[in-house]
């Protein structure tokens, strides 16, 4: 695969949608793998106690392994928690373990509870790892873990499932992004929307896609991720679809999405959360 241009500065992208099962984790790991295959150096930070991103990237994440939890509470530095994915020399992961399940509550009483991830990343000076993309996989909630991810990033990527009620809850997500933007991180904006689990045989999928494009305009990637059995099988083998079946439609669509993501300049302001219309 031909290499794609490296970003001029490191891009930190938070993958968020408080709805579960919309394809956050799938999009995080497959986009990360797609970018890595095309020459980028990528770090995935798993912020979901379920640890599904860690599983797909083939990194250790049993309880006690230095993880995003220890990083957030300040017990370890990035360098202690970062693992190399066996899938690619350019793909790294800070895993999530079940220990993260209590973090949402533990963080409440901590100093600078919203910016602990940002501080940890900055301290590590990730440039030392020569990382082009940091991709943060969020849990299905808008609690402190997701807020930490939004404070640490400039860009939010929202995966939207091409299904009934696709935009349900998106208004709330955008309001939260606006709040983080005005109080904690002025640079935060919705840079990217990815349509996932698209089934071309249904009218509904097209209707949803149209609706999302009307709502988010140019932020929506042209590459749409099809519903594909290969995509859903891959994590069961501790893989992304790009390792599991590189020639599949699912793999191709994530390669395209990665190329598109890399090609576009970071949208400055125009796609800012606050300016996007409500559902
Ligand atoms: P989230 O992280 O938002 O909860 P996941 O990425 O875990 O969502 O996806 C939810 C479920 O849908 C998983 O079982 C996953 O394998 C499946 N899935 C995600 N994307 C696709 C796709 N393009 N085709 C088929 N199944 C998919
Ligand atoms: Mg997930």
Image (cartoon, rainbow, N blue to C red):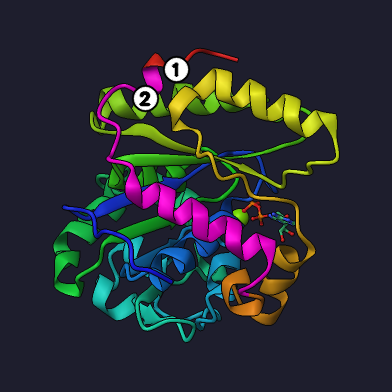
Near-viewer residue (265 or 67): 265
Task: State the extent of the magenta-drawn residues as a range.
Answer: 246-274
Q: Is residue 249 magenta?
A: yes
Q: Quadrant of residue 70?
A: bottom left
Near-viewer residue (111 or 61): 61
The relative height of residue 168 versus residue 145 in the rendered view (above or below) is: above
Image marks 1 and 2: residues in contact by CB distance under 8 Å: yes
Q: For this view, does 259 lie left or right of residue 224?
A: left
Q: Report the residue at 28% width, 64% height from top.
A: 74
Q: Quadrant of residue 85?
A: bottom left
The disc at residue 276 is 1
Q: Which residue is mark 2?
A: 271
Crowd rating for badge 2 (residues with CA inside 10 Å; few <14, some 14–19, many 20+): some
Q: Report the residue at 44% width, 28% height from top.
A: 218
Q: Quadrant of residue 141?
A: top right
The relative height of residue 238 versus residue 193 in the rendered view (above or below) is: below
Q: Report the residue at 25% width, 47% height from top.
A: 111
Q: Quarter holding the C terminus?
A: top right
């Amino acid at each position: 695969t031909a290499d794609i241009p490296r970003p001029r500065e490191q891009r930190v992208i938070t993958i968020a949608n408080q709805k579960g099962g919309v394809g956050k984790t799938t999009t995080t790991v497959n986009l990360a793998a797609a970018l890595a295959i095309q020459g980028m150096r990528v770090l995935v930070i798993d912020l979901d106690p379920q640890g599904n991103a860690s599983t797909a990237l083939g990194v250790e994440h049993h309880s006690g392994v230095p993880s995003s939890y220890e990083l957030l509470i300040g017990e370890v530095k990035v360098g202690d928690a970062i693992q190399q994915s066996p899938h690619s020399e350019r793909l790294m992961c800070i895993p999530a373990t079940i220990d993260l399940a209590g973090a949402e509550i533990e963080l409440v009483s901590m100093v600078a509870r919203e910016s602990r991830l940002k501080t940890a990343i900055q301290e590590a000076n990730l440039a030392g790892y020569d990382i082009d993309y940091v991709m943060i996989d969020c849990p299905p909630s808008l609690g402190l873990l997701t807020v930490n991810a939004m404070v640490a990033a400039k860009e939010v990527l929202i995966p939207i499932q091409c299904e009934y009620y696709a935009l349900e809850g998106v208004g709330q997500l955008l309001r939260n992004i606006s709040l983080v933007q005005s109080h904690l991180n002025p640079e935060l904006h919705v840079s990217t929307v990815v349509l996932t689990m698209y089934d071309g045989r249904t009218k509904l999928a097209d209707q949803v896609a149209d609706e999302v494009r009307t709502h988010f305009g140019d932020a929506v990637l042209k590459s749409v991720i099809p519903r594909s059995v290969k995509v859903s099988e891959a994590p069961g083998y501790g893989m992304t679809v790009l390792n599991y079946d590189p020639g599949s439609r699912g793999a191709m669509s994530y390669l395209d999405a990665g190329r598109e993501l890399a090609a576009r300049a970071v949208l400055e302001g125009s796609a800012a959360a606050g300016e996007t219309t409500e559902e």
